Amino acid sequence: MSLGKTIYVDKELGENVGCVSRIRIMSALVAGVGAGLLGLTNLAGALFFVVSALFTSFAILCFGCEGGPERYFPSGKKELFSFGSLFTGGMTYILAWTVAYDAIYIF
């Protein structure tokens, strides 16, 4: 008999959050290198990060969660689209962006 309540196991929930975090960091790394290679600077580079973070969230929602994040996270879509979650790979993005831009356009 189902009561309609989903039970979350802490270990599995932690693995889900860790997996999403690793995906976001790798996505930020790739986006940062892309922004550096494209020669984006200032707000164009920042906007590129925001767009890539939103794209990553939609990709996780569609492919990783199969359209149902409530099965994997108690907060559902809020886990994927919250401010903190979107900017998880921010520092990685800035590092990759700076290194790629400097390697191509400055050195």
Image (spheres, helix red, strand yellow):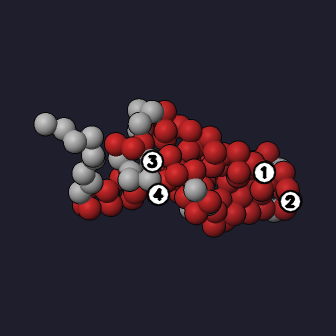
Q: Is residue 90 left or right of residue 25?
A: right
Inter-mark Cα distance, 2 to 1: 9 Å
The type of residue carrying mark 4 is Ser
Answer above or below: position of 58 versus 49.
Answer: above
Inter-mark Cα distance, 3 to 2: 33 Å
Q: Quickly name the residue at label 4.
A: 21
| Mark 3: few/some/many CA within 10 Å (<14, 14-19, 20+) | some
**Circle 1 — which element?**
helix
Q: Which of marks 4 and 3 is nearer the N terminus?
A: 4
Q: Quadrant of residue 29?
A: bottom right
Q: In which quarter of the image is residue 9?
A: bottom left
**Circle 3 — which element?**
loop
The label shown at residue 47 is 1
Q: Quickly name the residue at label 2.
A: 42
| Mark 1: few/some/many CA within 10 Å (<14, 14-19, 20+) | few
Q: Give how far across and how far down residue 96 sits, in percent.
A: 66, 59
Q: Earlier in the sequence, mark 1 or mark 3?
A: 1
| Mark 2: few/some/many CA within 10 Å (<14, 14-19, 20+) | few
Q: Is disc 3 in contact with disc 2, using a CB cutoff of under 8 Å? A: no
Answer above or below: position of 90 versus 71.
Answer: below
